[in-house]
Amino acid sequence: MGFLLFLVGRSYVDYYGGAPILESRSQVEQKIERIAQSLSFSTDTMAVYSIQEQHKSYFENLQSESSTDLRPIDLNEEGLHLQSWLTVLGAKESVDQIRLSAKDLFDEYGQLLVRVANNGNVIRLRSNPKRPNPTFVKAGDPLKLAESIIEEILGYDLSAYELQSDDDDDEDSDELVQIEGRTNEGTVDEQNFSELLNFKWKKVSSDNAQPTFLNLALNSVVREYTNGTNFSTEFGYQIDSFIAKHDREPTEFFATGQGLDLFTIIFFISLIVLAVFAFIIGVKNIFKGKVEWKRALIIFSAISLGLYGWQALFYLSSFSPFFDDGMVLITAINNLIFGIILGMYMALAYVGWEALARSQNHAQLDVVDALWQRKFFVRETGLGLIQGFAVGAILIGLFVGALWVLDLYFIQVDSQFGFTESSSKFAMLTLNMSAWTTTWLVIIVQVGFVYGIINHWFSNAKLAFGLSILVVALFTTTVGREIGTNGEFFEDYVIFLILSAVTLFSYKKYGILTTCTAWWVFICTFMITPYINSESIEIAYKLYAQLGIMGMFLVYGFIAYKKGTPLEKLGSYVPEYEEKIAQHLRVEREMEIARESQYKLMPIHPPKGPGFDVYGFFLPSFEVGGDYFDYVLTEKDGEAVALTMAVVDVSGKAMRAAMPAIFTSGLLLSRMKEDCPAKILSQVAEPIYNRTDRRTFITCAMARYDLKTKELSIANAGHCKPVLKRNGKASFIDTIDPRYPLGLRAEVDYQPKVISLNKGDFFLLYSDGLPEAVNEEGERFGFESVPELLERIDTDNLSANEIALEIKRTVQKFSNYQLADDTTVICLKV
């Protein structure tokens, strides 16, 4: 139904309705070459720029002046010039600007401007008074010469016209001469010897296809020739201007700039908003690791090359004859930078879209994954293409219907130069490059990405969908359309509001492949309408070739749908970053289990007994660490007799240190109730040496406090020196050699250091994480600061728990809660 509505109503809303493009660029330039030869110059030695222009402002003026509703088809069928080929001829390698309009090119660098109507007639010809005029016709009777130029060179039948005299009071004709006529200033080898000659004809026949006025302005010149010793002169005329004009046509077709209108302002605002969100969300997901780098790189390359290639091909087939090598290089660099910027924008938007789509489980992600894996012959891929053509037909029908109802028309606008595909020497390539880059930019960014953002912000699905339609309609009205209308901004917004509702419904129900296909079909269909019913094979082939390309995708869709492999047989795809996240979560779970296991090996509550107060803590610098502490109370006949304490520090950090720490804890715990520290360390030296690698060593300080004798027996296997505080003075305790760390030797005979404790004494065992704590300035806490810390703490009035907490707060505050190493402490107060 959509295609049917398009076929029925297209000609009434198409700017090219009733007047398809009838001549190709090459045919127009061949015609101009023949005219040039008749005017005594050749285009072979000149730079030639040709482009087809749509005279939209001319038609809008006619609409505003008419008492009835006018459509393009009405004027096209009358033979009025709503479109024409514009050709500028000038000196080669003369341009020193990158961005040029056709008018700028002629005014600054052109010698001759020729405008050819769609029916093949020359309707404007003008020389540039600032540049040499290349035309020349030998002298003769001026009137006969003018008639010869009009009939034999320009191809008009003067039998349908009447020559106007200077006395004829014709306002339109006078205005024509005043605007277009001027006096040539002369050149080096040409001398002006008379005033400008103006010849004016007015139509007397009823043939509406013929222009109402013909005006030819000639300049008299003398050419001087020097051939060796021979000198000669030649009298003749140059064409200053020629105008074939309908009475309702303007003299000049160039559109004038209108400054910043509402559409332009909203366009730039929309572009900035999209770019900012693409950057923020794309970069955010990159930092989160939610990016498939291969896909992002391909998207970046495809868009960059697509946009750069389109612009490069356009400049190559249009402005490049006017450029020297330096300007060609500058233009190439300028276009490449533009392509790279848009490629980066698209890549970041794609990263954001895919992350949002996966988190929200958007449709056809599995199909997209299959395509990225080069699995093209898939049943669901074929179904997506078929659905895309169906949705595309709906969009086409709705667009034509909305224009018909609003009494508007559509016009192709693929660049800042208007509609360029008909002028391109690489039309089939550039048309498709433009179509797929625009499709990706519109559907992935302005539909999928925007819908994902709004769906993330609003939990209410209906509200999110409604807001998405409003926002997507705003963006598609202003950015990346390739198809314009003559309506006001709000009329365009209503049209694209309808299209956006269908597009978003398609995206939500079917998915990204279907919606991309639909928009591609929509764009391609309206980009080829100027070629429908063209009688020129050089024009019509573009229509048939593009229809063939579209048809191949549709046929492939049906074949893949019938014969393709179902996705369920291919298996699900898990993105690389999701695998990494899952692996990271598994590691985190395992680390948490290890952390819990390590903490369970350490005492939860300190032992209680007469004459002592003990408390210890362990602070890992990672989730798990290589430190370990324990204290065990030995009892005999239900009475506490001794307290054994141990602090262990394994070389290394995290899991590599945690496992030997756990192994060592088991060896120590099995002996701590019965044996003295020196004997325990001597006995565990051999199994630790045999069961650890050569890179691992373990330091350990143990102490056993006899509750009856109040003697403290200490043994040290390469660990930090214990500290004793007595009578307010804290000092290190020097233990007896040997003090080799465990794991360095199989046999070590550790010796005890025995000291007597008095009431009020405070004893500290600690790991090197305490003195090696580092502050933000890179300064270490230092071993010498440990006794000083104890001297500052009121150990006489605080419990062992409170003293330990004070030590913990001090080291954490000093290191800004970023521990360089595991920190373990046991506080014993007598």
Image: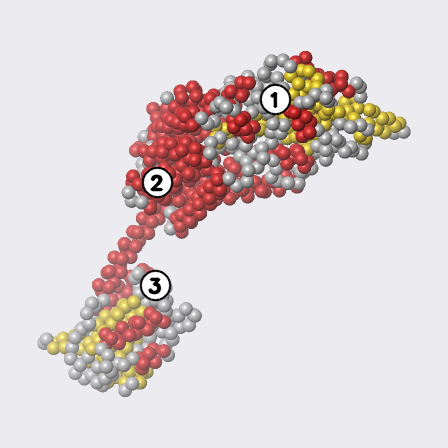
Residue under label 3, please give it. Answer: 653
- Marks 2 and 3, how far apart at CA: 52 Å
Q: Residues within 10 Å of mark 2 (few under 14, many from 20)?
A: some
Residue 325, position in %: x, y? Answer: 66, 39
Side of 645 where 68 appears, left or right: right
Residue type highlighted by circle 3: Lys
Q: Quadrant of the C terminus?
A: bottom left
Q: Nearer the viewer, mark 2 or mark 1?
A: 1
Query: Which residue is at 31% across, 82% downward?
Result: 791
Q: Which mark is residue 692?
A: none
Image quarter of residue 599: bottom left
Query: Is label 2 in a helix, a strand or a loop?
Result: helix
Q: Which residue is found at the position 77% from the left and 20% from the top?
A: 142
Q: Amino acid at mark 2?
A: Leu
Residue 460 shows in this picture: yes
Residue 357 visible to the viewer: no
Residue at mark 1: 246
